[in-house]
Image (tube, rainbow, N blue to C red):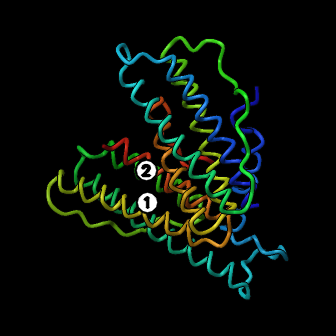
């Protein structure tokens, strides 16, 4: 169960890195610097988390799942609203994944997942999300 | 292309986990279905203690938020948001609100700082509880509560 949850988290992080890379390419540093900064920060964070969870999987003696060739993106990402909406959807999905990992792990792995859940929950606010009663559930 | 995360199916899994936690928190989670937490189960007893402790801490936070809003109307937008969240979390835990009022000292600025510090401490205790929980479903609920508090800290900043 633990390894399965970590592999699920790794798959989600592969997707997050891909999607944020695409969102970054659609975000203007000059015309929307706040969104650009948020997308860039999210990309950096998820790339680091991908590497962390991959290490956890290896530590658990498993082969890390590989990234897919591509991931779903909206047809139209030409507006800041569309970019923020996709980022919000992604962070909510990540929060749900981390909550699943929290429930499936213990110790250092659970601590990692809790930290990631808190970060994703806070990040949803930057992309237009509203505070929730139980983020990730 | 595949979807970034199997959200729908995961949501269903999480719904099951949350439901299990709710059952556990309501004291209906023992295998016999008798409606009480099994007293001879050290695992369940530990988690029951955790729920009691966290419930008391949330109730104290609610009391402080209420008292702060009463003492300083200018802070009510903040205290209302926090109070509502704490009430919802107490409801999740099936725990009552604390009938006592929290103590508020100093002026509005001091009270605001004290309130947010107390919220920060509550978040840290939620994380500790999530780490300590034997039940994965309960750990998930505590972690989600901590995440909700983290969101409120950002909104308040």
B157 w.r.t. A38: above or below: below
Which residue is disc 2 drawn over? B150
Q: Where is residue A75, by image quadrant? A: top right
Judge left or right: residue A58 versus residue B88.
Answer: right
- Residue A116 place in picture, x, y as percent: 53, 50
Secondary-structure class at tag 1:
helix
From the viewer's side, name the closer residue of A47 and A41.
Answer: A47
In which image quadrant can residue A62 be found? bottom right
Decide: marks 1, 2 in contact (CB < 8 A)?
A: yes
**Which residue is depicted at the point 83% across and 74% down?**
B31
Are both tags, 1 and 2, on one chain? yes
Tell me which numbered mark, 1 or 2, is placed earlier along the sequence: 1
Rendered residue at 61%/42% (across/down): A94
Tell me which chain the residue with mark 2 is part of.
B
Question: Dot 1 corresponds to which residue?
Answer: B123
Real-space Cα separation, disc 1 to disc 2, in angstroms: 7 Å
């Amino acid at each position: 169960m633990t390894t399965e949850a970590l592999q699920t988290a790794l798959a989600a992080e592969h997707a997050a890195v891909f999607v944020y890379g695409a969102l970054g390419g659609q975000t203007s540093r000059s015309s929307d610097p706040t969104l650009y900064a948020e997308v860039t920060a999210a990309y950096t964070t998820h790339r680091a988390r991908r590497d962390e969870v991959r290490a956890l999987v290896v530590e658990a003696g498993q082969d890390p799942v590989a990234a897919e060739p591509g991931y779903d993106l909206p047809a139209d990402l030409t507006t800041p609203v569309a970019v923020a909406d996709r980022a919000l959807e992604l962070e909510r999905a990540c929060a749900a994944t981390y909550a699943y990992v929290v429930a499936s792990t213990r110790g250092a792995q659970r601590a990692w997942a809790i930290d990631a859940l808190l970060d994703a929950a806070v990040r949803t606010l930057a992309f237009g999300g509203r505070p929730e009663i139980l983020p990730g559930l | 292309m595949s979807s970034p995360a199997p959200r729908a199916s995961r949501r269903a899994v999480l719904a099951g986990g949350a439901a299990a936690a709710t059952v556990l928190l309501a004291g209906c989670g023992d295998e016999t279905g008798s409606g009480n937490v099994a007293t001879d189960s050290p695992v369940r007893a530990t988690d029951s203690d955790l729920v009691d402790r966290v419930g008391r801490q949330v109730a104290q936070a609610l009391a402080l938020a209420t008292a702060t809003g009463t003492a300083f109307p200018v802070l009510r937008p903040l205290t209302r948001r926090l109070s509502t969240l704490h009430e919802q979390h107490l409801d999740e835990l099936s725990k009552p609100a604390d009938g006592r009022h929290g103590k508020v000292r100093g002026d509005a600025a001091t009270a605001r700082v004290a309130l947010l510090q107390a919220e920060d401490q509550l978040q840290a205790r939620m994380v500790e509880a999530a780490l300590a929980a034997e039940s994965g479903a309960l750990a998930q609920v505590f972690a989600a509560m901590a995440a909700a508090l983290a969101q409120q800290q950002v909104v308040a900043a």
